[in-house]
Image (cartoon, coloured by chain):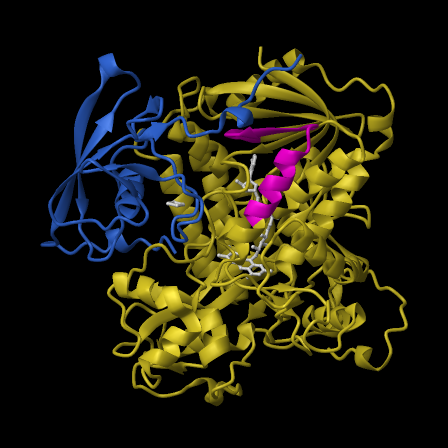
Chain colours: A blue, B yellow
Amino acid sequence: MSDKVLKKRGKHQPTTLLNIFRGTDASNTKFQTFEVPFQSGASVLDALIWANENLDQSLSFRYSCINANACKECMMLVDGEVEYACLKRLEKQVMRLEPLPNKKLIVDLVTDIVPPKEKFLTTT
Amino acid sequence: MDFMTTDVLIVGAGAAGMYASISAAKSGAKVILIDKSLISRGGATVMAQMTVAAAIGHQEADHWTHHLADTINSGRGLCNENLSYLLCKDAPEKILEMRDWKTDWANDDGQIRQVMAPGHNVKRCCYVDFLNTGPAVARTLRGEVARQSNINRVSGVTIIDLKVRDGKAVGAIGLNNETGEFVAIGAKAIVLAAGGLTQLFQRNSASKNMGGDSHALALRAGANLMDMEFVQFFPIGHLAPRLVGMDPIMWDPFRYKLGGHLLNNKGEHFIESYGGADGEAYTVGRDLASYAIIKECEAGRGSPNGGAWLSFQHLARNELETAFGPIIQKLFENNIDLTKQAIEVAPIAHYHMGGIEVDSTMETKISGLFAAGECVGGANGANRLSGNAIPEAFVFGDIAGQSAGSHKDVKRNFTPIDGEKMLSTTFDQLYKQSSNKTVSSEMTSRKLLSKLQNIMWTQVGVLRNKEDLHDALLNIQEIQNDMFPKIQPSPGTTFNPSLMDWLDLRNSLLSAEAICLAANGREESRGAHQMEDIPTTIDSFMKNQIVSLSSGQLTTIWKPVQRIKLNLGERCQIKF
Ligand SMILES: Cc1cc2nc3c(=O)[nH]c(=O)nc-3n(C[C@H](O)[C@H](O)[C@H](O)COP(=O)(O)OP(=O)(O)OC[C@H]3O[C@@H](n4cnc5c(N)ncnc54)[C@H](O)[C@@H]3O)c2cc1C
Ligand code: FES
């Protein structure tokens, strides 16, 4: 359930700062900071979905299954380590999110993870 | 220009789409299998953790006619029995075929283990340990698909609309998510296998890609939907504490194996007071359990987050570990120790019985347009038996693939639609809706999707009533007519969430409206459609409700239920 855990935000609720890599190519990229509510037990993906809905609809990242850790689409670098965003817990501190370094960058946290044999190729 | 042609186009690569692609390819057709996510990963199939029902009789004497009787009983009078028949009759051979393809069904020296599940009369449900059925099935089919040289796999293309010429499906247009470009596919036959719609409800077990694309695509292509009002709510979805890396319906297998206690905030067993039994054996039906939990919450006896407590504290650690090995460790990593604490559970939207209307070859009203999997309506009537969805995806996928592969147009020299023309008209139509309206910067597709989920959950959820259903319809139409047109997606950029969300919203609104309209029409309680203000099942409503789209308007008509005449013997003294 992607129940909006992060939205039940009391006045003094602590927040997490997500420092997120933005952009499409090496010459035109930056880190942008998003302040998201911290909720114990929430995943980094929960926070990204919250940010997407409440702060910036253009923020790009991949995910499908949200809870089950089955689709394996949400892999990214969290504080320099390769993690599944849906498994990695949100921490009450600054967290740095970057795209996978060994894959071609598409935009923001999205890299090219589509197997070469599954690309749309024009046949006629 | 990005244009491809093929004999058979398959939209959606879950169990149904993958099975269909294999069968179509085996019949000699050239196939394109497309998924908006990644092949085999985007939908419900890979997330399923439990069981697959099939009368293979490895544990107890069984026959598909018994499975059929149970399925029809559970469907509360509404099963399209021709479809239920196909599901139950063909499920055993699919389980064995999957075994030949190396799905590791839990077994003892080749005898596949089968367990009991509510509503089945014998041990009928196969599984892969531990809670690994879906991933195993997805892997097997992905491997088989890759072995077929005439299947062209495409990940990351969202199908936006199907194209129909003179009542005949001829192709589709899509969005290449990565490049942001529109693409066209000409096809002689199409199989829609893009899954369910439970993401329309705020509390759900769905992936992001289950927002009703199948249903909206079918409606706009001119096909009919049926039984849209029947959404199955799973009573004990995980609610709190936040649990990551686990499917929210994971507590069901715990209850099968270990029982467990369902308690209100006073620590009382409450299922009994609603007429259910909740002893050590887990037998209470899904509809009754959902009802009881909602009622306890309404009476102020719910758990803190609005559900019920589920406790295994009476069991010893080693009992838990024997039953669920690695899962207990995963729970620890989530700071959950079942010997010390109860967890909170609540009903969540989990499966949709309704869907696209098809005949026994899985063809819709539109020639050359087939459907398969969860997006097909009818086989499970008003209430699905647990374990029936994955075999449904296998069996209907297989039939749809064969039918599409041998469709008359595939066999002859038929020219599918001109891609260039298809693309240019699509651009126009797609954006006309938002072009001359004021654009709101406040409103986003994502926010409206959340708003829609909230309406569906609070007004079209587990317990319904006339007033709420009526309001919900108006609320959805307001979003559709007043808010949606004010949103302007920005096309043409790479992996653009604003455009992808906009396309999702476009479909979700139409599918939600179809559910709502059908729910308004059914003035009785039956199976998963429970009306608080009309609690009885009314005989004159033992019929299927058909939804179609004409000139932009959804309309409904009623059709008699399709029955079959089979001599099913004693077991099939079907009671409703
Ligand atoms: C968490 C969970 C657990 C379950 N457990 C069980 C169980 O134990 N036993 C059982 O029998 N059933 C179970 N079910 C139900 C069962 O898994 C599904 O009904 C079944 O897998 C559906 O298969 P499908 O191929 O029809 O759809 P899916 O597997 O959902 O596949 C549909 C695919 O279509 C793609 N798609 C969607 N829209 C588009 C588009 N516009 N363009 C291109 N592609 C698109 C999606 O990305 C997805 O990959 C479970 C369901 C869930 C959610
Ligand atoms: S979202 Fe599916 S694995 Fe993380």
Percent coordinates x, y for residue B502 in the rendering: 45, 32
Percent coordinates x, y for residue A124 in the rendering: 67, 12
Q: In the depicted view, which residue is nearer to us: B204 or B403? A: B403
Q: Is residue B82 placed above or below B494 in the rendered structure? A: below
Q: On the rendered structure, is B290 left or right of B297?
A: right
Q: Which residues are magenta?
A: B138-159
Q: On the rendered structure, is B461 left or right of B59?
A: left
Q: Residue shown at 46%/84% (left/top)?
A: B271
Q: Quadrant of residue A44?
A: top left
Instruction: Inspect this view and state whether residue B226 appears.
Output: no
Q: Residue extending furthest front?
A: B109
Magenta stretch encompasses residue B158 = yes
Instruction: Inspect this view and state whether residue B430 appears.
Output: yes
Q: Residue shown at 64%/11% (left/top)?
A: B420
Percent coordinates x, y for residue B382 in the rendering: 66, 65
Q: Residue shown at 11%/51% (left/top)?
A: A14
Magenta stretch encompasses residue A18 = no
Q: Is residue B308 placed above or below B382 in the rendered structure? A: below
Q: Residue shown at 32%/47% (left/top)?
A: A86
Q: Quadrant of residue B19?
A: top right
Q: Quadrant of residue B533?
A: bottom right
